[in-house]
Image (cartoon, rainbow, N blue to C red):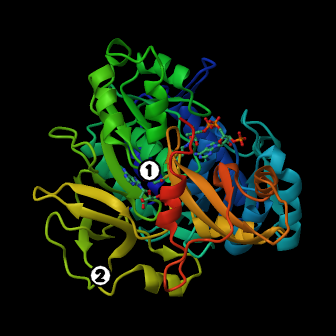
């Protein structure tokens, strides 16, 4: 049997392929038949460029129906999809392209100049543009390709995607995700979350990360039904769509912003059967406020780029606020102490996981694979947690130095390295502080070179030119020296305590 994920989806397509996959605000619909024909055309075009299964296709484009169909095309052609956040700047994109050596790059118009230069340097010949309206050179070039394409045979262990995740060392690693990783997780989520023929999902997440691309789209594709597809999150538009939909998925910021809408009430959600939250901790108070206003209990789940979804609160049964639920079927989740011994219920330890959904390794980093997996094959999530006696996992914190801002991950080391390169900066430390909208806000603490007068605005402006905007500190504090412990290590907890309360709201 062909283990290509697209073939799995195809088996679930509705009998009437004229039924919609995407419902757009403009009134346009993309049917399953159109999705199949267009993804065939894109796949034929990419194969016609000489790309062969296993080649990477890097994609940095705004969300559009065409962007989703391009992903499906890559699956069909056996190409490895490499999505990039549209906020990434030249230096970040340069690193990814150099590391992944893609056979083709599809770029947003505003990055074309810089991406062109990187491609020239890297000897990447195939560069096309796709804009937020789903228009551009890529579509023009692919227009004449045939609308028939035989989905390429793939084995379960063949790569479907590479997703770069930043690291505690400041350098990004490409997580290698196989067809089996994606299929196993899609099947389990589709089943556990009770998808059925009446479901319509409101899709407002970006398409370049796991939550929007895999979790949300795969549930819909496994279900053969429709999603209301928006370019980005907008609380007002979400509210309007909830009245005619059944499932919503979002990061906690979506929920806090929805709660700020006076129109959010029981009537607005009366057709809804499921609200899912993940990618960052959902505060118990948000959970409770949402239930009070809407009568709906948010289902919180937990996962990672490297592993897909790992645990989920139940569809039927108690959805316990502050917990991420129980391990999903087929996924083995354990909590161990520093010595690797399994912790007793209630005791906090390292969360480690094993299962068909766990990545096959990091792209061209064999030494990382050794570090990130235990000898008995468990992946180290870098999260700390504890199990209750009845098997609910609570995430208690992170052993990795990570900030999650509005659902996007920011590794302080990367920001500190960028800060330390600025001429007026002697040293720096970056921490996350509570923020009413983004959950955590990136905050920098900087020691200036003696006599230097660099201001907060100068630092922010300099970093904006180099880093994706969500990584740029919301505040920069200047100090004479950083607090250190007796070992000389910066005491980030002291900084976190000192600067908490400075965020918006
Ligand atoms: C935008 N900005 C952010 C930000 N998003 N800053 C910090 N954190 C973020 N997440 C910047 C903007 O560029 C702008 O900067 C300023 O903050 C205010 O922007 P905004 O208009 O309020 O932002 P908006 O465009 O509305 O975006 C916010 C958001 C978006 C929450 C809707 O960030 C979002 O869609 N987040 C979802 C992330 C996601 O999909 N995560 C899943 C990862 S997968 P300036 O300077 O220009 O004013 C994963 C695995 C798993 O983690 O388990 O799911
Ligand atoms: P990413 O690398 O973007 O895939 O982010 C994965 C990380 O997000 C996990 O390792 C957790 O730290 C965090 N995360 C995801 N879902 C949750 C959740 N429901 N609660 C707390 N943290 C979460």
Please state the quadrant of the image where ligand 1 appears: top right
Q: In this view, does 495 lie to the left or right of 15?
A: right
Gap in Å between the C-alphas at discs 2 and 1? Answer: 25 Å
Residue found 58% across the figure and 70% down from its top:
174
Q: Which of marks 2 and 1 is in front?
A: 2
Q: Is residue 431 left or right of residue 216?
A: right
User: Circles 2 and 1: CB distance less than 8 Å?
Assistant: no
Mark 2 close to ligand 2, CB under 8 Å: no
Q: Is residue 122 above or below residue 45?
A: below
Q: Which of marks 2 and 1 is nearer the N terminus?
A: 1
Q: Name the residue under label 1.
A: 279
Comparing 351 with 132, the one in front is 351
Residue found 56% across the figure and 43% down from its top:
503
Mark 1 close to ligand 1, CB under 8 Å: yes
Position of residue 108 measured from the top left corner of the image (x, y, whole percent): 77, 46
Quadrant housing residue 224: top left
């Amino acid at each position: 049997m062909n283990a290509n994920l697209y073939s799995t989806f195809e088996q679930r397509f509705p009998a009437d392929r004229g039924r919609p996959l995407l419902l757009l605000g403009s009134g346009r619909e993309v049917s399953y038949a159109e999705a199949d024909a267009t993804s065939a055309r894109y796949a034929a075009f990419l194969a016609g460029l000489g790309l062969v299964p296993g080649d990477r296709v890097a994609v940095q484009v705004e969300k559009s129906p065409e962007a989703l169909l391009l992903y499906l095309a890559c699956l069909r052609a056996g190409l490895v999809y490499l999505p990039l956040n549209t906020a990434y700047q030249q230096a970040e994109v340069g690193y990814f392209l150099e590391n992944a050596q893609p056979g083709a790059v599809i770029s947003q118009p505003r990055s074309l100049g810089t991406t062109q230069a990187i491609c020239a340097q890297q000897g990447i010949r195939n560069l096309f543009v796709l804009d937020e309206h789903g228009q551009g050179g890529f579509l023009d070039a692919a227009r004449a390709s045939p609308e028939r394409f035989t989905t390429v045979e793939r084995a379960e262990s063949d790569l479907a995607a590479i997703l770069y995740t930043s690291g505690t060392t400041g350098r990004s690693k490409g997580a290698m995700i196989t067809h089996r990783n994606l299929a196993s997780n899609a099947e389990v989520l589709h089943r556990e979350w009770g998808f059925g023929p009446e479901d319509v999902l409101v899709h407002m997440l970006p398409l370049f990360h796991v939550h929007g691309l895999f979790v949300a789209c795969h549930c819909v594709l496994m279900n053969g039904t429709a999603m209301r597809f928006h370019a980005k999150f907008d609380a007002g538009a979400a509210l309007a769509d909830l009245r005619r939909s059944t499932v919503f998925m979002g990061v906690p910021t979506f929920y806090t912003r929805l709660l700020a809408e006076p129109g959010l009430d029981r009537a607005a959600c009366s057709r809804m059967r499921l609200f899912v939250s993940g990618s960052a901790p959902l505060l118990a108070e948000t959970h409770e406020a949402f239930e009070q206003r809407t009568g709906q209990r948010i289902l919180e789940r937990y996962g990672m780029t490297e592993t897909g979804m790992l645990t989920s609160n139940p569809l039927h049964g108690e959805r316990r606020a502050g917990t991420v639920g129980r391990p999903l079927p087929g996924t083995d989740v354990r909590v161990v102490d520093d010595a690797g011994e399994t912790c007793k219920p209630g005791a906090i330890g390292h969360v480690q996981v094993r299962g068909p959904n766990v990545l096959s390794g990091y792209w061209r980093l064999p030494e990382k694979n050794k570090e990130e997996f235990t000898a008995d094959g468990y992946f180290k999530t870098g999260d700390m947690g504890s199990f209750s006696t009845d098997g609910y996992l609570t995430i208690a914190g992170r052993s990795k130095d990570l900030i999650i801002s509005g659902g996007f991950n920011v590794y302080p080391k990367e920001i500190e390295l960028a800060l330390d390169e600025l001429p007026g900066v002697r040293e720096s430390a970056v921490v996350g502080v509570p923020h009413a909208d983004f959950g955590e806000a990136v905050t920098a603490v900087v020691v200036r070179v003696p006599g230097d007068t660099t201001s907060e605005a100068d630092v922010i402006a300099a970093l904006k030119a180099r880093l994706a905007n969500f990584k740029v500190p919301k505040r920069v504090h200047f100090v004479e020296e950083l607090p250190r412990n007796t070992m000389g290590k910066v005491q980030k907890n002291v900084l976190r305590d000192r600067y908490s309360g400075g965020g918006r709201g």
